[in-house]
């Protein structure tokens, strides 16, 4: 579901496009927010317009307000089921009661999202050997745009292929080796694996294939391959394959992803 479609759907509840845009960002990434964050996002002073917006959220039961420690302000959790339903996130964990630690983490993440509009956020679903998952990814140019950082999270709910469920996370850094004239990707997994890939020489503008040159913390002989297929200006598919010692590559997971956020 495109970000613009989500903003339009939320605006149908009586919000301005700017308010709807902010709410979509909150629901996708944190579930909680502060009035100062909306004021900064909207480029307005923290005054009457901000207070009226949050009063409307609480009065209409779209959000609940919780006092901060020492009554120095309020934290707002957006939890209304209908709002999450129209953006395709009915079962979002952000609707559930939040621990203090998750509130803090959510507010920090929202600050980061609002502070760095250069981030490109993507989301989709994954299917493969470990089961079905919801996937969120972010890509950002770093260090004078010489590198690209990618961070991914895949959440597997309990299911037949994965009875206990799990959350997988990995971080990758893309670079370009001017000597070899090839793109390189170094990928770090929460399980401890570290994969170094090099782009295949036969990669195309709409199809990039990376094959491992080395993998740390795994028995010798294993190989991995990541393929990125561009499906459109705001959509791509990521295919991950593994090969045991002396074996051919087998599909491990396939993840179509769509660009989920463009700042309003």
Image: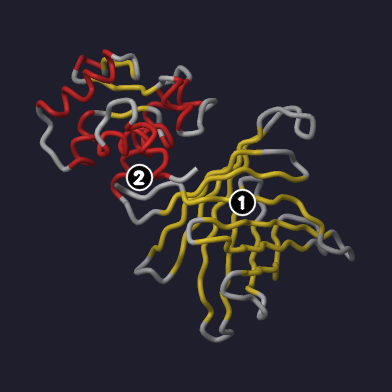
Structural distance between the alpha carbons of marks 1 and 2: 23 Å
**Which residue corresponds to the image point at 32% horizontal and 48% vertical from the top-left?**
263
Q: Report which residue position mark 2 lands on.
A: 113
Question: Residue 196: x percent and y percent?
Answer: 64, 66
Q: Secondary structure at mark 1?
A: strand
Question: Residue 69: x percent and y percent?
Answer: 26, 17
**Which residue corresponds to the image point at 58% horizontal and 70% vertical from the top-left?**
206
- Mark seen at residue 74: none
Q: Is residue 185 above or below residue 71?
A: below
- Count numbered badges in the picture: 2
Q: Is residue 2 above or below residue 96?
A: below
Mark 1 or mark 2: which comes first in sequence?
A: 2
Instruction: Determine whether, in the image, residue 203 is placed left or right of residue 83.
Output: right
Q: Nearer the viewer, mark 1 or mark 2?
A: 1
Q: Give residue 237's quadrant in the image.
A: bottom right
Question: Residue 122: x percent and y percent?
Answer: 49, 49
Is disc 2 surrounded by few (<14), some (14 to 19) or many (20+) residues within 10 Å?
some
**Which residue corresponds to the image point at 21% horizontal and 15% vertical from the top-left?**
70
Q: Report which residue position mark 1 lands on.
A: 256
Question: Residue 136: x percent and y percent?
Answer: 53, 44
């Amino acid at each position: 579901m495109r970000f613009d479609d989500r903003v339009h759907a939320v605006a149908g509840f009586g919000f301005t496009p700017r308010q709807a845009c902010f709410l979509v960002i909150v629901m996708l990434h944190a579930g909680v927010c502060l009035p100062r964050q909306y004021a900064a996002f909207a480029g307005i002073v923290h005054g009457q317009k901000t207070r009226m917006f949050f009063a409307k959220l609480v009065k209409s039961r779209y959000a609940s307000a919780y006092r901060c420690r020492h009554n120095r302000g309020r934290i707002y959790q957006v939890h209304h089921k209908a709002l999450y339903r129209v953006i395709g996130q009915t079962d979002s964990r952000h609707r559930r009661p939040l621990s203090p630690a998750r509130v803090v983490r959510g507010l920090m993440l929202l600050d980061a999202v609002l502070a760095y509009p250069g981030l490109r956020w993507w989301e989709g679903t994954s299917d493969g050997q470990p089961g079905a998952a919801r996937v969120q990814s972010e890509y950002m140019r770093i260090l004078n745009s010489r590198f690209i950082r990618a961070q991914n999270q895949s959440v597997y709910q309990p299911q037949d292929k994965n009875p206990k469920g799990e959350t997988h996370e990995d971080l990758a850094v893309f670079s370009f080796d001017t000597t070899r004239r090839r793109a390189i990707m170094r990928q770090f997994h929460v399980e401890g694996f570290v994969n170094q890939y090099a782009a295949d020489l036969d990669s195309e503008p709409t199809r990039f294939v990376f094959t491992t040159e080395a993998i740390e913390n795994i028995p010798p002989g294993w190989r991995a391959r990541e393929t990125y297929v561009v499906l459109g200006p705001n959509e791509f598919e990521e295919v991950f394959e593994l090969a045991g010692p002396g074996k051919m590559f087998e599909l491990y997971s396939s993840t179509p992803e769509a660009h989920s956020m463009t700042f309003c």
